[in-house]
Image: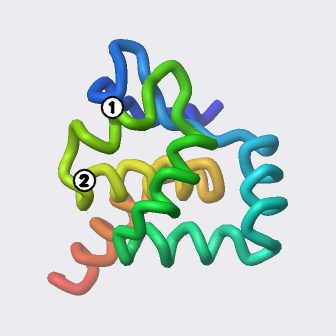
C-alpha cells in the first residue's frame, strides 16, 4: 500500500503533510470543483493564501504558522505540492518532474 505522507518536521516534531478525501472535499467546497488546478496554480505563484489553505487542510501534528516561517517559500510550496500530487497520483510531483528532466537529458 502506498504511503501518502510527506514529512514536515519544521512544523513540529511529528508533523506530516497528507491529504485524505475529506481534506479534498473541504477544499472543493471552499474553492470549487477546480480546486486541484487552483491549488497547484496558487502554489506555483507562491500565493500565501493558497499555501495557508493547503497547509491547514493537509498538515497533521504540526503548526501552520511554524511551517510558514521555518522554510523558504519555494521549498514549502514544493513539499505541499508533492503531498497533494502524491495523494492524487501515488507519486510525488518531484518524482515526475525528475523523470521528465531525465527523459529530456537523454
Give the label on residue 80, or none.
Answer: none
Q: Position of residue 90 (x, y in %)?
A: 58, 50
- Mark 2 residue crowding within 10 angstroms, few (<14) / some (14–19) / many (20+): few
Give percent across and percent down for residue 89: 61, 58
Left or right of 30, for residue 103: left
Residue 93 placement, left or right of 40: left
Q: How many marks?
A: 2
State the residue at coordinates (41%, 15%).
14
Question: For residue 75, which numbered disc appears in the image?
Answer: 2
Identify whether 34 is placed above or below 77: below
Residue 73 is left or right of residue 82, and the answer is: left
Whole-percent x and y of residue 100?
32, 77
* Cα distance in 3D space between marks 2 and 1: 14 Å
Left or right, 33 with reference to 104: right
Residue at image location 73% in from the left, 68% down from the top: 31
Q: Secondary structure at mark 2?
A: helix
Amino acid at each position: 500500500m502506498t504511503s501518502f505522507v510527506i514529512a514536515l518536521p519544521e512544523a513540529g516534531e511529528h508533523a506530516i503533510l497528507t491529504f485524505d478525501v475529506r481534506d479534498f472535499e473541504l477544499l472543493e467546497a471552499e474553492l470549487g470543483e477546480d480546486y486541484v488546478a487552483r491549488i497547484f496554480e496558487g502554489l506555483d505563484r507562491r500565493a500565501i493564501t493558497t499555501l495557508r489553505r493547503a497547509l491547514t487542510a493537509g498538515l497533521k501534528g504540526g503548526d501552520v504558522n511554524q511551517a510558514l516561517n521555518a522554510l523558504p517559500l519555494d521549498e514549502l510550496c514544493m513539499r505541499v505540492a508533492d503531498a497533494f500530487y502524491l495523494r492524487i497520483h501515488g507519486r510525488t510531483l518531484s518524482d515526475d518532474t525528475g523523470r521528465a528532466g531525465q527523459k529530456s537529458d537523454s
